[in-house]
Amino acid sequence: MTGDPSSGGPFSGFDLVAAGPGVSRDDSGEAAARDRVAPGNPSVTALRDQFPGAVFRNEICAGDEDVVYVDPERITEMLGWLHNDPEQHYDHLADITAVDYGGGRPIEVVYQLWSIPHRAALRVKCELSLDALEIESITGIWVGADWLEREVYDLFGITFTGHPDLRRILMPENYAEGYPLRKDFPLRGRFSRAEQTRRALTQDPEDYYVPGEIAERVPQVVEPAAGEEGDAEGVG
C-alpha cells in the first residue's frame, strides 16, 4: 500500500523511510490487532499471569519468534523472573539493542533471550519516549549486559541506571556529534567535512587510551637470535 506521506494517506514502510524522521503514521489499529495474537511460547502467557498489567502486547515475528512488550518500569523484575524461575530459565542473554523508527515515536529497547535447557527464544521490548530515554540496567542479572548496554548508550543515547561503568564504547569519549544510530542524526554528521577532518587530525592519544595505559606501555624490543648479530656485522 502506497500513498503520499504529506497527504496523511496510507503509505508503505519504504515511503516512511524516504520521507525522513519528521513523518509518522498511525499504528493504533495494528497494535490493537497484536494484542489478540496467540503466543507460541508459553513464557508469554506465564508473564501475563505473573505480572498482571505489565505486559502491554505481544506479536509473532518472522513466523515463529515471540515478541512481548513490557512495562519499562518493571524490566529488571520481569527479566529477573524469566532468568531465575525454573519453568522459564532464560540463562543466556543473546543481545541488547535498540530501534529508532523516527517520526517522534518511542525508541524500543530490545532484549533477546535464550533458554538453553528449554531450547526457547523470547524477545522482550520496552518503549521509551524521546524525552525519557532511561531504563534500569540488567547487569545484576546477566554480567554480559555490561558492554551491550554501553553500546546502546553510545549509539542511541539511552541511559541505563545502575550500570557499573556507563561510558561510550565505540565512539571516543569526547565525541560531540550525538548518537549515530538515531534517526535524527544527519547522514554526513553534524559537523562539516572540514571540521571533522580538523578534529581527526588534532585528536590526542588519550582519546583512545586512558592515561594509565599510555604510561604503562613498554616499547617492544626485538632481540636478534643467536648467531644473527655476527652475521649482520659481516654484511657489506
Image: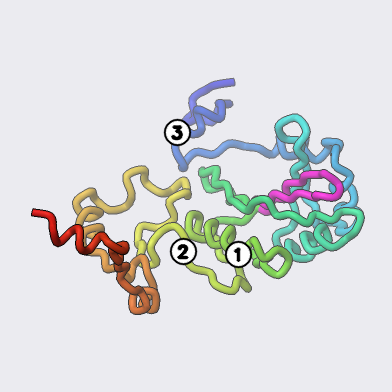
Q: On the image, numbered disc 1 is attached to which residue?
A: 146
Q: What amino acid type is highlighted by mark number 3?
A: Ala
Quadrant of the image containing the C terminus:
bottom left
Residue visible at 32% across and 52% down in the picture: 190
Disc 1 and disc 3: Cα gap in Å?
35 Å
Q: Secondary structure at mark 1?
A: helix
Say which label, 1 or 3, has the lower sequence index. Answer: 3
Q: On the image, numbered disc 2 is attached to which residue?
A: 168
Residue 18 located left or right of residue 70: left
Q: Main secondary structure of the magenta part?
A: strand
Quadrant of the image containing the N terminus:
top right
Residue 139 position (above or below residue 41)? below
Task: Please provide percent x and percent y for residue 116.
Answer: 80, 49
Q: Secondary structure at mark 2?
A: loop
Q: Which residues are magenta?
A: 110-126
Magenta highlight on residue 113: yes
Q: Residues within 10 Å of mark 2 (few under 14, many from 20)?
A: some
Residue 59 position (above or below residue 167)? above
Task: Please provide percent x and percent y for residue 28.
Answer: 69, 39
The image quadrant of residue 19 is top left
Q: On the image, numbered disc 3 is attached to which residue?
A: 19
Task: Please provide percent x and percent y for residue 218.
Answer: 34, 74
Residue 144 located left or right of residue 184: right
Residue visible at 47% across and 46% down in the picture: 183
